[in-house]
Image: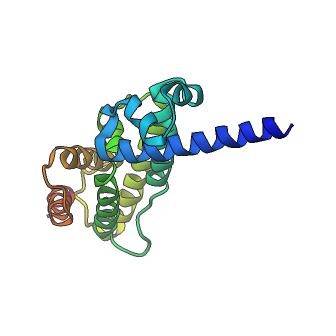
Amino acid sequence: MTGERRQRRDAAANRERILIAAQDAFRSSGMTVDMRAVAAAAGVGIGTLYRHFPTREDLVRAVTGTDLAALAGGALPPHVSAIDGLHAFFGTAIVHLATNKALVDLLTDGSPSDEDLERCLLHLTAIGQDAVDRSRADHTLAADVTAHDIAYRLLALIRIVQLMPDAGPEAIEHQVGLTLRGLASH
């Protein structure tokens, strides 16, 4: 029993090291990271990595699922106009995503049929609907802006950040501002 318990503890420790190494590698290098490099960074063999995560997709899902959940948990701040709420939400989301190349890759290149991604897109559309609803009272968004328009603008911003050579805070703020001017009432 003691040997089995130790093996389970070792297996759990290996899994945790793999997740930490994968998280670091995917965030800094994106989805193209080599699985052997993840195993080496975790201090395990490639076979151990694949015992815990039989496919690359399993590992990606384990690493990015928490980040997608965090994005899907975001909301417009209360008691502000639609445009100011979108500014705060877009800015926070994009700054967070700028440090996570894997999540940016997933959101810009991933299949919308992925359950986690689909749930995230539905949530972004709900945030867009909240902004549209607020704008009915404060008139800060153009009258023809829809919830889907807002969700797609955030995805477009994510792609822009992915392509920018320097995605620092000022550059991100500039892109967010440009996007919001396109959604604002004039």
State which quarter of the image contains the C terminus. Answer: bottom left
Q: Residue furthest right?
A: 1
Q: Choose between 81 and 163: the one closer to the eye.
A: 163
Is any part of residue 64 visible from this angle? Answer: no
State which quarter of the image contains the N terminus. Answer: top right
Residue in view at x 53 percent, y 45 percent:
17
- Would residue 113 appear left or right of 6 to someone viewing this image? left
Residue in view at x 19 percent, y 61 percent:
168
- Would residue 144 appear left or right of 19 to someone viewing this image? left
In the image, residue 49 sits, relative to residue 67, either above or below, namely: above
Residue in view at x 25 percent, y 61 percent:
141
Q: Choose between 103 and 18: the one closer to the eye.
A: 18
Q: Position of residue 27 (x, y in %)?
A: 35, 47
Q: Position of residue 155 (x, y in %)?
A: 29, 44
Is any part of residue 40 visible from this angle? Answer: yes
Q: Position of residue 39 (x, y in %)?
A: 45, 34
Q: Position of residue 108 (x, y in %)?
A: 29, 37
Residue in view at x 34 percent, y 34 percent:
31
Image quadrant in which you'd find residue 142: bottom left
Q: Residue furthest front?
A: 3
